[in-house]
Each structure stands twice: as C-alpha cells, then as structure tokens.
Image (spheres, coloured by chain):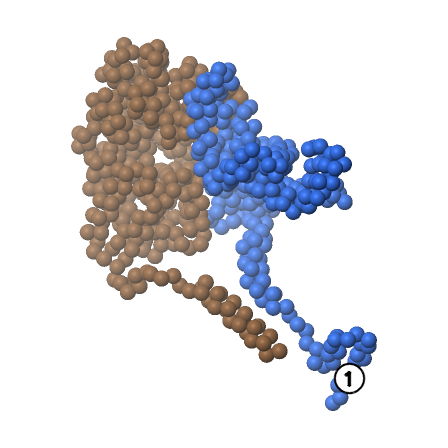
C-alpha cells in the first residue's frame, strides 16, 4: 500500500517536473540593456543576393550611426512568395510580426496585405511623401501602405559578340518588333539560342507580357479598382506576338522545364544571343559576359521605331507592421531606405534603378545600366495592367499560358479562363 | 459500526477474500495520468484545429484581416472550380496506382526473404530514398528530366532519341512520371514493412507446402499473402492517406503543379490557395472536404480488406 502511494507520488512529481521544464523561459535575451531600441526587419533578398546584402548592411549602419541607441536587426526570410506570405500571415495573426517588411509592390504584394500594414499618413511627413514617386504601387483606398524602392522593368539584353557573329551591328539595338525578329532569326542561323528563357514556373509568360505591352498600348495610370479585361484586343495582340515568337523557336529549346533560377547560365556561358530579364539584372549579367559585350533592347516599337512608353514600376516596397510599437522609428527607417544617400548608394554599388529622375546615370560604372536609366529618364514611364492583377489572377495567367505554349489549349481559351478567375476575384 | 461482510469464495485456496464494500476504493489506473498530457496535446493540436478550420471554412478570409461569414459558399464553389476538380482527378490517378504500391514492395520483400542475390544490399539501397527530403527529390528529378538533362541524354546514347521529351512540361507524361518518382521514393518503406511481416511467418508452413508439392507462387499465395494481410491493410491505408496529404513537398519543387494544373494534387492546391492566392477560407473548406472524402475512402478500403480477411 505504502509502496503504491510512493510510486504514484513519484510518477506525479516526474510528470510535473517535465511539464514545468517545458514551460521554462528560454535562456538568453538582452534584458539588461533597456536603453537600446531594436527594429526588426524582414528581408527576403539578403540571402539570395549578395550585392543587396552589402547595400543593406551599409544602409543599416548609416541609420544606426544617425540614430544612437537604435539597432537594426535584419531577419533573413525565404524568397519564395508563397512561403514568405505564409510567414507574414502567421506572424501578423499571432502578434509576432516584425516592425518592417520588405514586400512586392501592387496587388500581388503590399496591396494584398494591407490588413496587416500601418497606413503611413501621419507617420511619414507629408513633404517626404510628396517627394517620393511610385506611391501608387502601395496605395489602396487613398491610404499609403509602403514606400517604394527602386524601379523595375523587363528588358532584353544581348551579347554583342554573338550579334556580330550573326551579321548584326553590335552597337545598334533593335528598335522595332520586326528588327527584333530579324535579330532572332540571324542568331538562330548562327547556331545560337535566340532568347534565353526559363519558364518552368511560368514567369517568362508574365515578363514577355510586360515587355511587349508598351509596344501596343498607351500608358494608363494604375487604378487598383479598375476591372480587369483579358478579352481586349491589346491583350490578344501582345500574347499572340509572344506565342508567335515561341512558335518560331526564338526561346530556349526546353524552356518549359527550366526553372527561372537556372536559365541565366545559357546567356552567361555564351550559348544564347539574347536573354529576357529585368533591369536590376544588368550589372550581374554585364559582369558575367563583359561590360563592353552587353547591350540592352528596351521595349520595341510596332507602329514606329519606339514603344509608346517604358513600362517601369516600383521594384519593391517597404511596409510597416500594424502591430509595431515603434511607428515613428520604423517610418524613419524606411524613409532612409527609399531616398537620399541610401538609394543613391544602391544605384552606384549594385545598379538598383533609382526612382528619382535626378540621379546622374553615369554614377554607376556599368554602361548597360546607365543606358537603362537614361532611357527611363528620357521616356514616358508607366505601369502595365499586370500591376492590377491580384495573386490568383497572376497565378492563373502564368499557368494558362504554360498550357498555350505546350499546345494544350488555344490562346483564346486561356484568356477566357483567366477572365473567369479575374471576375470571380472581384477584380 | 459493523462492516458488512461478504461471503468468501469457498474451495479456492489462495484467493484473498473480497474486500468489504466500505473499504473498496475505485482505482484510477496510473496510466491515465501518463496519457493525459499526450491526450491534451492531441486535442489542442489535432482536434481543436479541425473545429477552428470548420469555422474559417464558412468565411471569406485572406489570413490577415477579419474573416467575413459567407456560409457554405466555399463548399459550393468546390463543385464548380475546374482546378479543384482537376486536382481531385489527379489524386484519383494516384489511387489507381495503389496496387503497384502494394505488390511491388511485397514482391521485393518476398524475393529478399527467398535469398535473392544481393538481397541485403538491395534492402539497404531501397532505404536511400527515404533518407532524402521529398523537396530535395523534387529538385533532383526536375534537373534530371529537363529536355537536355541526363535522362534524355541517356536515351539518346542508347539509341532511343525518339523517346526524349520534356517529361515534366508535357501534360501527357507529367502525371505518370510523377507517380513513378513518388513510388520509387516509397518502395523502401513498403519493403521494410512487408519484410517485417514476413519475419513473423512460421517457416514450417513453407516446409509443409513444399512437401505437398507447392511451387514458388503457390507457396507465397497460400502462406505469405494471408499472413501479410494485416500489414497490407495498414500499408494500404497509409498510402491512401499520403496520396491526399503527402504529395505537396515533392510536387512543390518538381513541377509546382504544372504545366498549367496538369500535376496539381489537392494538397498542393490547398497550399496555393492559402498562400499564393490569399484565399484561406476556401482553402480551409477544400481541406475539410478532402478530410471527408479521405475518411470515406479509407472506410471503404478497410471494409474491403477486412471482408477478404474474414
């Protein structure tokens, strides 16, 4: 009897000890240094892009120097959109969100997360907001939810040596769609891939849409409430042109099974004469094939030798969590990242296309980057309808165009399906 | 107060008399106290979330803001959502491959038991895929199966260039290829299970069968198969559940459900709805509908297998 009682008591004590051990607070934590303020920043590029990490560290150090007692803690996050969104959702709902987020612009990014973001009116001075361009990328219902950083546009880079080998003038970039076709035909005849692409995820479908749209359409200001129309003639023209280019064999053979992360090797290794890419890739590609060996073909003209405009939109957005207790500090931090010295340094050091039109293009040492900036500064710039696509529509577009490229459905059926999803999403 | 005495058992030596009622206490097994933490955790992390999920499935919710109640709209949407129907169809293609998942590992286990050459080495080799994360497997095969990847290079090398294709970008081949990859990854664990089951079979039964003149197939049909029924039942249920819940890690890196939605399964679609599209209400409804469907299928499967057993 006594033995039984002792055993039960020992068992209960053991269970209690194990339970309490699990509730013990973790070791560590700098609880003694109450004067320091730490700003937690989620950043999904510092792991994937060494140049961005270097620029980020410099910007953080500059902010800390200007704000004694403040520490910036950048937390590395996965660059996969779905995984990052999952983390953001969980963090906001559980009240463990960081102070600042790095986000994609427009409806696939910041505008899909406004329920968890702090409107910036009132925390960022109005005169600062007035000086920043591209705020429409983070504005919904009259509220501004983030500050944009950098500009992004889709371009085609070309290898000048391969151009020359194909009988083309390496110093004269194609200016019209016909000239682009001629260049692609010549490069193919010379035994190279005309345009390198990796479309396993369907990204090239969206990039070519952005690249070709300004060739066919006039710029229209971004309106997040505007209904989406995939049955219009311009969309038909743009995507028919893209499918025609695929059908002519201009893109990488086997592009549909090459991931976006792996496709640049074709261009860097000199197997492809051109590559569809983004403006911020100019510096790394130039480093790979030589500053003097790379040229750029911005959007081409159809009816004339110039596109109607250049589709350049904010690249990324810095947003502040609604749950932060350091609103003003966070606002000051994101302001420091999106203008002034930090933005200038990012252009100089890594070719991050500036939003400001006052930047001297020659302050970046890479000629192709200078050319992109000059063109943007000298042109009418605007968005494409793609910026108004919510995530479901963007995903559906990429997937349906994959099926068009593989020949499983017609372009008309694909666009009709995308329209259905757009209508269902309320866009 | 006198204690009411109960009659003692007679004629049974060594049996202690029944304790008087007033001193007999209800004993709570000590095991319950040890089980309690696990049960609480199970309720908190398995049962309660299903309840929460049901509530959220009745809403339009982006995972961040406040959910908006919309009743059973999400459930009705399933029947008109072509992607959901495609995903469920892809899961049923997997279901049709279930016999392969049972008989291939069973056959390998039998051959190893029979002492086939290099049996032990094969058994260890089959374990290797189990050591790899499905996501890593997906990345590996995505590279292997590219148009100019090693598989097509090999086919060309052996004089079969007509068979080369973009295996994962062709809507006709992506599902069979995916099934082959996932089967390859799971054969090892199935073989281990059936091997363990065969270890409990009485070898004298095989001797008796041999004496009666039974050949290889007769021996195993008459002796091995009946003895492996419990293992087969368990493995079949396990595989069925994994068809609907375990394909996501591999598919996410292998094809991301493409081309189009040709290789999208229901668990991958649920993930994409929740975290690509920010449609957690519908995603949750689809998850619960899958739970109901899977429960029904598992029940049917159990009854079929148990009926054969009886």
State the image coordinates of residue B253 (x, y, percent, origin top left).
46, 35
* Label 1: element kind: loop
Q: Quadrant of the N terminus of chain B?
A: bottom right
Q: Nearer the viewer, residue A333 or A221?
A: A333
Q: Is residue A163 above or below residue B177?
A: above
Q: Residue at x 34, y 13 (%)?
A: A191
Where residue B244 sits, quadrant-wise, is top right
Q: Residue furthest front?
A: B211
Neighbours of disc 1 within 10 Å: few (<14), some (14-19), many (20+): few
Q: Position of residue A269 (x, y in %)?
A: 30, 23
Residue ID at (58%, 47%): B58
Q: Is residue B74 above or below residue B141?
A: below
> A184 or B123, which is in the foreground?
B123
- Residue A16 in view: yes
Please identify the quarter of the rendering in which residue A6 is found: bottom right
| Position of residue A41 in the picture relative to residue A362 (left or right) | right
Q: Residue drawn at (49%, 65%), measured in percent from left and top?
A: A19
Between residues B263 and B228, which one lies in front from this camera angle? B228
Q: Is A83 on the left or on the right of A270, as rendered? A: right
User: What residue does disc 1 label?
Assistant: B4
Residue B178's x, y, as percent?
53, 31
Question: In this orientation, which residue lies closer to the viewer: A14 or A129?
Answer: A14
Give the letter of the chain under mark 1. Answer: B
Quarter containing the C terminus of chain B: top right
Instruction: Name the quadrant containing residue B172.
Output: top right
The residue under the point 68% across, 46% down is B202
Place of residue B298 in the rendered image (x, y in percent of width and height, measured from the top left)? 66, 43
Give the chain ID for the blue colour: B
Viewer can see residue A394: no
Colour in which the image shows chain A: brown
């Amino acid at each position: 009897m006594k033995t039984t009682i002792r055993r039960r008591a020992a068992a209960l004590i053991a269970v209690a000890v194990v339970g309490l051990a699990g509730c013990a607070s973790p070791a560590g934590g700098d609880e003694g240094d109450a004067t320091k303020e730490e700003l937690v920043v989620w950043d999904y590029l510092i792991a994937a892009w060494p140049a961005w990490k270097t620029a980020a560290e410099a910007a953080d150090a500059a902010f800390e120097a200007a704000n004694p007692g403040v520490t910036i803690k950048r937390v590395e996050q996965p660059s996969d959109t779905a995984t990052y969104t999952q983390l953001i959702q969980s963090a906001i709902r559980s009240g463990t969100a960081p102070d600042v987020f790095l986000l994609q612009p427009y409806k696939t990014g910041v505008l899909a997360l406004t329920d968890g973001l702090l409107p910036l009116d009132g925390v960022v001075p109005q005169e600062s907001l007035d000086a920043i361009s591209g705020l429409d990328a983070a504005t919904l219902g009259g509220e501004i939810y983030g500050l944009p950083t950098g500009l992004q546009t889709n371009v085609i880079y070309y290898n000048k040596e391969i151009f020359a080998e194909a009988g083309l003038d390496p110093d004269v970039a194609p200016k019209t769609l016909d000239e682009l076709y001629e260049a692609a035909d010549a490069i193919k005849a010379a035994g190279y891939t005309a345009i390198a692409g990796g479309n396993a995820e369907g990204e090239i479908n969206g990039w070519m849409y952005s690249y070709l749209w300004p060739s066919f359409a006039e710029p229209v200001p971004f309106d997040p409430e505007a209904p989406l129309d995939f049955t219009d003639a311009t969309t038909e023209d743009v995507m028919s042109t893209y499918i025609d280019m695929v059908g002519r064999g201009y893109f990488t053979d086997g592009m549909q099974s090459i991931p976006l992360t792996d496709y640049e090797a074709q261009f860097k290794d000199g197997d492809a004469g051109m590559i569809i890419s983004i403006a911020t890739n100019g510096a790394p590609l130039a480093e790979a094939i030589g500053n003097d060996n790379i040229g750029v073909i911005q959007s081409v003209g159809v009816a004339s030798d110039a596109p109607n405009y250049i589709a350049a939109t904010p690249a990324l957005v810095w947003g502040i969590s609604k749950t932060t207790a350091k609103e003003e500090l966070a606002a000051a931090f994101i302001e420091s990242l999106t203008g002034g010295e930090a933005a200038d340094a990012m252009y100089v050091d890594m070719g991050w296309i500036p939003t400001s039109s006052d930047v001297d293009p020659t302050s970046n040492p890479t000629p192709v980057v200078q050319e992109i900036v000059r063109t943007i500064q000298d042109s009418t710039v605007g968005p494409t309808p793609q910026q108004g696509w919510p995530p479901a529509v963007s995903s559906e577009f990429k997937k349906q165009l994959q099926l068009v490229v593989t020949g499983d459905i017609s372009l008309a059926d694909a666009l009709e399906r995308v329209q259905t999803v757009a209508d269902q999403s309320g866009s | 107060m006198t204690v009411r005495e109960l009659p003692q058992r007679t004629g049974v030596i060594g049996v202690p008399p029944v304790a008087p009622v007033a001193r007999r206490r209800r004993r709570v097994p000590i095991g319950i106290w040890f089980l309690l933490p696990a049960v609480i955790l199970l309720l908190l992390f398995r049962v309660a979330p299903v309840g929460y999920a049901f509530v959220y499935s009745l809403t339009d919710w982006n995972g961040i803001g406040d959910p908006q109640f919309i009743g059973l709209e999400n459930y009705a949407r399933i029947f008109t959502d072509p992607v959901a129907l495609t995903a469920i169809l892809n899961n049923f293609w997997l279901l049709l491959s279930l016999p392969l998942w049972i008989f291939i590992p069973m056959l390998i286990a039998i051959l190893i038991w029979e002492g086939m050459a290099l049996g032990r080495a094969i058994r260890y080799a089959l374990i290797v895929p189990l050591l790899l994360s499905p996501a890593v497997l997906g990345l590996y095969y995505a590279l292997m199966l590219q148009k100019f990847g090693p598989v097509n290079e090999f086919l060309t090398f052996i004089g079969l260039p007509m068979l080369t294709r973009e295996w994962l970008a062709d809507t006709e081949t992506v599902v069979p290829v995916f099934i082959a990859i996932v089967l390859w990854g799971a054969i090892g664990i199935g073989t281990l299970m059936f091997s363990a089951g065969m270890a409990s079979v009485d070898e004298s039964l095989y001797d008796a069968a041999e004496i009666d003149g039974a050949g290889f197939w007769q021996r195993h049909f008459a002796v091995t198969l009946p003895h492996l029924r419990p293992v087969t039942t368990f493995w079949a249920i396990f595989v069925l559940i994994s068809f609907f819940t375990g394909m996501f890690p591999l598919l996410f890196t292998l094809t991301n459900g493409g081309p189009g939605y040709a290789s999208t399964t229901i668990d991958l679609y649920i993930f994409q709805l929740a975290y690509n599209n920010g449609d957690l209400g519908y995603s949750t409804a689809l998850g619960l509908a899958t739970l109901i469907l899977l429960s029904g299928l598992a029940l049917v499967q159990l009854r079929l297998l148990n009926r054969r057993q009886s």
